[in-house]
Structure formats: structure tokens, C-alpha cells
Amino acid sequence: MDLAVLQDVIDRTYGERDRARGVPSTVAWLAEEVGELAQAVRKGSRADQEHEFADVLAWVASLANQVGVDLTAAIARYGQGCPRCATMPCACP
């Protein structure tokens, strides 16, 4: 699934509820999911890790939808390598 499709699916599935919840609460949910991902990476099974990665991506898509960010356009800054030093692999100190 590409990012545009992800954003569309998340919006159609959860958009109304997410907008009612608002940006601050969505950020809080995202932070909670990042914490769960960190725990799964440290101690969880592969299935736990996949589940938490999916949850984090879904919450990122929800937040992007709420603030009007196109994730495909946003991630394009990494399309040619490091956006800071413009090399691949990164040569930043």
C-alpha cells in the first residue's frame, strides 16, 4: 500500500472520529503508539513489532490528514538520499 492509499483508507475508516478527537488528542495517541512500538522492538515478537509499526503508521496518517499534509509529498525530501547533505549514503558528521 502506498502512502496516498494509506491516508485515504485511514480517512475513510476513521476520519470523522479522528477529526472529532482533534489534533492534540491524536498526537497523544501517536505518542502512546510510538511507546508501544519501542517496547515491541525491545521485547516483543515479530508479530508484535509488525502490529505496532502498522499502528504507528496509521496514527501518522491520521495526524497528517487532520493537519492537511500529503505524506507522499512530505517524504519526497528523502527521495534523493539524505535531505541535509544530499548524498546516499548519508555523509553527515
Image (tube, rainbow, N blue to C red):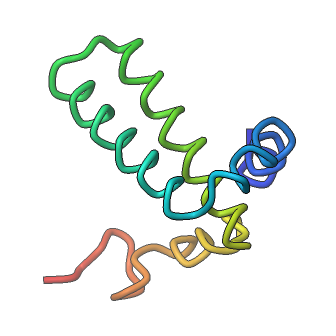
**Nearer the observer, 13 or 76:** 13
Q: Residue at x 41, y 86 (%)?
A: 86
**From the viewer's perspective, is 2 left or right of 93?**
right
Q: How many marks?
A: 0
Q: Residue at x 63, y 52 (%)?
A: 21
**From the viewer's perspective, is 74 left or right of 30?**
right
Residue 46 appears at what percent x and percent y? 35, 14
**From the viewer's perspective, is 87 left or right of 61?**
left
Above or below residue 80? Residue 66 is: above
Residue 34 appears at what percent x and percent y? 34, 43
Residue 48 appears at what percent x and percent y? 37, 16
Above or below residue 84? Residue 60 is: above
Extreme residue toward the front, this view? 20
Quadrant where the N terminus lies?
Answer: top right
Give residue 13's quadrant in the image.
top right
Quadrant where the C terminus lies?
Answer: bottom left
Q: Residue at x 41, y 12 (%)?
A: 47
Above or below residue 68? Residue 34 is: above
Give residue 64's quadrant in the image.
bottom right
Q: Residue at x 29, y 74 (%)?
A: 90
Residue 50 appears at what percent x and percent y? 45, 23
Above or below residue 23? Residue 50 is: above
Extreme residue toward the bottom, this view? 85
